[in-house]
Image: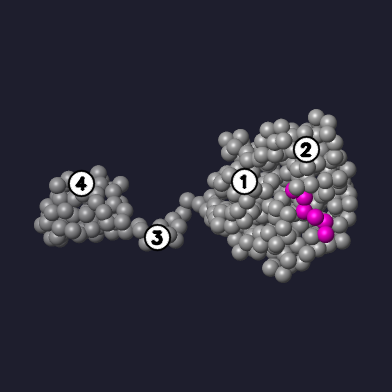
Amino acid sequence: MSNEYIQIEGRKIGPDFEPYIIAELSANHNGDINNAFKIIEEAKKAGADAIKLQTYRPDTITIDCDKEDFQIHGGLWDGRSLYELYEWAHTPWEWHQALFEKAKEVGITIFSSPFDFTAVDLLEDLGAPAYKIASFELVDHALIARVARTGKPMIMSTGMANEEEIHEAIAVAKNNGCSELVVLHCVSGYPAPAEQYNLRTIADMQERFGVLSGLSDHTIDNATAVASIALGACLIEKHATLDRNGGGPDDSFSLEPSELKALCKDTKTAWAALGKVNYERTEAEKGNVKFRRSLYVVKDIEAGEPLTSDNIRSIRPGYGLAPKHLEEVLGRTVNVNIERGTPLSLDLLNKA
């Protein structure tokens, strides 16, 4: 792996650090900047590390055209043209400065996915600390190169991309100056079925491409994201909304505030549980050793009597000899009178 971690605004991101959680605002403002402000506030309250925007205008991502190529059939956005979708979903550029200021006010990192060079210029003017390349833009090498030349940390999603396309995108980023990169496994379905996520790809991605890896998660709940931590994901991106039933372009597959809070909590718990390879007794276990089985006297025994299966047994608690010694002590005689309920120890026995 080329980097053990990257940093965004001083926050280290890598396998040795708590998962970095990005709340994707995307189109969930539903045309109202106050909704966007509220999502930023809720993301901070939930414990997310960053809020992410998408920076485009309909004219920078497609053209207004009635031809069949530009029409959407099926799915969440059925019946719209591409232009209509992006007109509906985009975050107005004149909002960006206010959104950056709001994030600074509440104390959460903010950056964006640019979709063309002019978006990068805008975000550079605003001092964006990092950049995200969206899955659909992973094949746009010119955009990747432009972002890489900013020298900022980069995150790239790989939805729909095959191995060759991922190799190419990573090479373009690195060849143009990107030294801090996280590559996200992703399924570009909205929503995406958990059974299609193939989370084992995350660990393979780290080895195959020599990068830090994470997850861009479009499933409905948090199970997939939490599971990804066990496979090495160091960064999770998830859409966030105020109301899943709000009717916006992305609301239906986004997390509400309580769910985002659970994601932040549960992924950090999963990461903490990974720990290290350990066969030693943990602190939580030490107090319970006394409840293991051990050898106890279960009938009164007089001095000189032999031990038998009738007068000693392996029972709880664990203050006597370990049960593994049972066969070797059976038949040996005791050197004192022993009361029922006494833990068996070698100093109570005559020499064999």
Mark carried by residue 221:
none
Mark carried by residue 81:
2
Q: Is residue 141 magenta?
A: no
Q: Residue at the far top: name it.
A: 68
Query: Disc 4 residue type?
Result: Leu
Q: Label 4, on which residue?
A: 330
Query: Disc 2 residue type?
Result: Ser
Q: Nearer the viewer, mark 1 or mark 3?
A: 1
* Residue density around tag 2, few if under 14, some if 14–19, many if 20 or more, within 10 Å: many
Q: Residue at the far bottom: name it.
A: 105
Mark 1 or mark 3: name the one nearer the start of the chain: 1
Query: Disc 1 residue type?
Result: Ser
Query: Disc 3 residue type?
Result: Lys
Mark carried by residue 286:
3
Mark 1 touches mark 4? (CB < 8 Å): no
Q: Mark 4: which secondary structure?
A: loop
Mark 2 or mark 4: name the one nearer the start of the chain: 2
